[in-house]
Amino acid sequence: MGKLESYRDLEVWKVSMPLAQGVYQATEVMPKHEIYGLTSQIHRASVSVRANIAEGYGRNHRKEYLHFLGIADGSLKESEILLLLANNLNYINDIAELMSMCESAGRLLNRLRQSLKGGG
């Protein structure tokens, strides 16, 4: 792999876009009374994954970058639990593909974090 020109070259950033888009599409069927509750929270968490990857990349120090990648990982876990809750409440019927995307993004995020820590 060549030198990264931007956070947009990171594989984890690339795979997190379809996740956020999928979350937005899946939540279109959620009850209107959840628009400012669960729906909004799922949206924010899924977008936060990508945003924190980008923000961390723009930081001057590796420690700061790792901090933001940790936040991205937390947002990813938050997205998973909120998707599970929405599914358990029968607000979203099929979350298998979204959960698979979360798992893929999580693996890539973990690899990136390990490589920055010097372990990969």
Image (cartoon, helix red, strand yellow):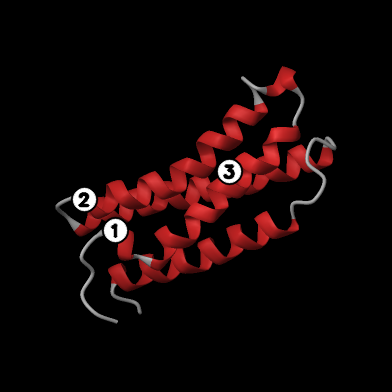
Residue 6 position by quadrant:
bottom left
59 relative position to 81: left or right: left
Which residue corresponds to mark 3? 78
- The three-letter code of the residue at mark 3 reads Glu
Q: CA distance from mark 3 to mark 1?
A: 22 Å
Q: Amino acid at mark 1?
A: Tyr
Determine which residue is flagged by label 1: 7
| SS category of the residue bearing label 1 | helix
Q: Residue at x 60, y 40 (%)?
A: 24
Residue located 59% across and 28% down the image? 40
User: Separation of disc 2 and disc 1 at Cα?
Assistant: 8 Å
Is 47 drawn above or below residue 106 in the view shown? above
The type of residue carrying mark 2 is Gly
105 on left or right of 26: left
Q: Residues at badges 3 and 1 in contact (C-beta under 8 Å)?
A: no
In contact (CB < 8 Å): disc 2 and disc 1: yes
Q: Earlier in the sequence, mark 3 or mark 1?
A: 1
Q: Residue at x 64, y 30 (%)?
A: 39
Task: Point out residue 69 in the picture as x, y percentages from the top left corner.
Answer: 37, 54
In three-dimensional space, the C-alpha distance between marks 2 and 3, rounded to whole angstroms, equals 23 Å
Crowd around label 3: few <14 · some 14–19 · many ≥20 (10 Å): some
In this rendering, position of residue 46 left or right of residue 115: right
- Which of marks 3 and 2 precedes in the sequence? 2
Residue on which the image places disc 2: 58
Q: Nearer the viewer, mark 2 or mark 3?
A: 2
Question: Which is more N-terminal, label 1 or label 2?
Answer: 1
In the foreground, 91 or 84: 91
Of 87 and 97, which appears nearest the observer?
97
Q: Position of residue 102 (x, y in %)?
A: 59, 57
